[in-house]
Amino acid sequence: MLGHRSRMVWGAALLFAGWGMPLAAQDASGSDELTIAARQFGIRASVLDVSLSPSGTKIAYITAGPEHTEVINVVDLDGDAKIVAVLKNTEEIGDFDWCEWATDVRLVCQFSGMGKRPGGVLIPFDRLFAVNADGSNAKMLSQRDSPRATGFNQNGGDIVAFDVSDGEGEVLMTRNYIPESDLNTRLANSKSGLGVDLVDVTTGRTRSREAPDDGALRFVADQDGRVRIKVRALYDGTGNLTGDYVYLYRAPNSNTWKRFEKLTVDGAAIDSFTPVAVDSVRNVAFGFIRRGGYRAVVEVLLDGSDAGKLVMARDDVDVDALIRIGRKRRVVGASYATEKREVAYFDPELDALAKGLAKALPDQPLINIVGASSDERRILLIASSDTQPGMVYLFDKEKRSLEPLLPVREQLVDRPMGQMRPVTYPAADGTQIPAYLTLPPGSDGKGLPAIVLPHGGPAARDEWGFDWIVQFLTARGYAVLQPNYRGSAGYGDAWYGRNGFKAWDIAVGDVNDAGRWLAGEGIARPDQLAIVGWSYGGYAALQSQVLDPELFKAVVAIAPVSDLGYLIEDARDYTNARIVQEYVGDGPHVAAGSPRRHAERFAAPVALFHGTRDLNVDVRHARAMEKALASAGKQVIYHEYEDLQHGLEDTTARIDMLTTLGRFLDDSLGRGN
């Protein structure tokens, strides 16, 4: 968890500023092919988040408006199905993240943003609020800021459980308590840390369920609304996070916390267990362990024996996610990604449903269950694929009906997309690197302008599915190869290795070998081969020039790391400083692996893009990279976006970025318009 040492006060007025009327539909027309494509793919999604009411008769969804706006909409499915705009956010430094139904008339939503202290230190924050389905009676649920507070409350809390009492409209949520400086009055708060309160979402009245704990990071409740697991983060003597955690649990009908100790899975001792969910009926915790170098799902009894059994594991990829459904967040399966994302359902009915829908819908899509009514008779799901951005459906079990509700990206409906197919290619040492190749629609895959697109992270991976940047590039006629280079997550400990910073030479070497493979296979024209990346992918794009300046003829880096030393320095004002230091490491690889320090080696023109409120990668990385390249007499362009964060979640900015990026690639590769 990222925490800042300094303190500041942020009034609730910011959260509610800018809410007004709904937005008009956005225009995706344009005067030329590049402009049209940039607008269609740059417009943010029509559905950013969607949820189903307890009765299954209403949905709430967040849609992106022009520039940096979001609108919360409600639709009565059993009524006139009219879209009603509930609230609108126009605050550029913050976003609506999600909304869930507390009752059939009351929503709980999260707003998050990025504050900035004098001196430029960024401070992330979030808040929970409740609002009626017609937009009335908005009420803050997070702990309110006090002018006497000794610090700024970054953490607005999380919903631990819905439907937790006999009274309708109460939720169990974490709340962060900040002590107040004036302790000479009975009204001053002396509590400190994260606790759990029962909160009435209509009146805002609260009752404490778990006392605040300074070290608490997360709480987990079972289906009955009882808090059963507490996660505590450990700090060193300087106040920095160590990266280690303590996991505590409660037996049924007990208020005593016990630590997971001497854990066994199928009789064998294990070193660590990360609990995620609790099944109160069977009195077990579901969570993750490392098994044979891969992540696996286990269940552990909460009866004091600490005895567990293996639920799901693989010997080629991590099992990395639990699938949960409904308002009780019932665990129904687990998920992993090989060439495609797969879900193994423990629930036979859901397994049959998902398989049947995947076969019945176009392009054998991925089926993602995103909501369910209280009785689970109505299920909200999103079906998407590599060529389909996604459609929100309502499935009615009794009627056996599947009703399309909303396209996830309305502006891309019926636009042809390139098909993504899994491939492997050899690295220089012979290691086969998994990747995804997407060709322009109708292409024969020969002699094309081509892009290598390394993912961010680096502890992440690309997966089969819709990607708006990939499809923008294929719409422009480029073949796109996405390598899951060594240092990527999801393929086990050996593949992850020492991570993509400490072992940047291996990771970036694999990325460069992706370009050589494209050219060697005749897919790419060597003189029209470029590299594009975001975050760590942007770092890999820049560092590719340090390893081999002649390989790529154009470089695009979005929110890139440009100096490994900067990463360590940038973390010093935050409680994760020790973790970042250990992750990046020290030694000769820091200087050798910092493209800013090797600008003289660059042969290809470079395009840089960055937002000024980027906490993941400070904007100074792009600014310094531009300065270094310009000083070395290299070709470079730079677009900076005021007050935007790492994801550039702004339609105007994304359209500008895609338009500039498209023109830059065409000009640099000699393609004209």
Image: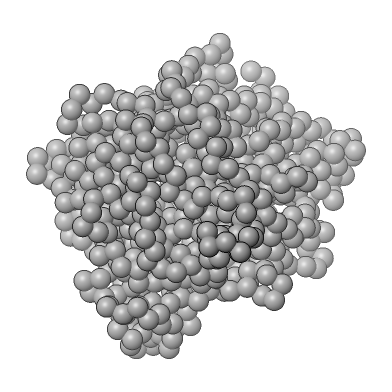
Quarter of the picture containing the N terminus is bottom right
Q: Residue furthest top?
A: 31
Residue 277 as seen in the image, left or right of residue 65 = left
Q: Residue furthest left?
A: 398
Residue 434 as seen in the image, left or right of residue 108 = right
Q: Residue at x 66, y 26 (%)?
A: 660
Q: Residue at x 58, y 51 (%)?
A: 146
Where is residue 272 drawn, in percent x and y?
47, 79
Image quadrant where residue 222 sits: bottom left
Total numbered badges shown on the rendered structure = 0
Where is residue 313 drawn, in percent x and y?
37, 70
Residue 356 as seen in the image, left or right of residue 306 = left
Q: Which colour scheme appears in the figure? A: one colour
Q: Identify which residue, 525 or 544, lies in the foreground.
A: 544
For residue 397, above or below residue 25: below
Q: Residue at x 39, y 71 (%)?
A: 229
Residue 280 as seen in the image, left or right of residue 112 = left
Quarter of the picture containing the C terminus is top right
Residue 500 visible in the displayed image: no
Where is residue 194 drawn, in percent x and y?
50, 64
Image quadrant where residue 658 sits: top right
Q: Identify which residue, 246 or 141, lies in the foreground.
A: 141
Q: Residue at x 37, y 66 (%)?
A: 209
Residue 48 visible in the displayed image: yes
Q: Identify which residue, 639 or 498, lies in the foreground.
A: 639
Where is residue 78 drawn, in percent x and y?
17, 31
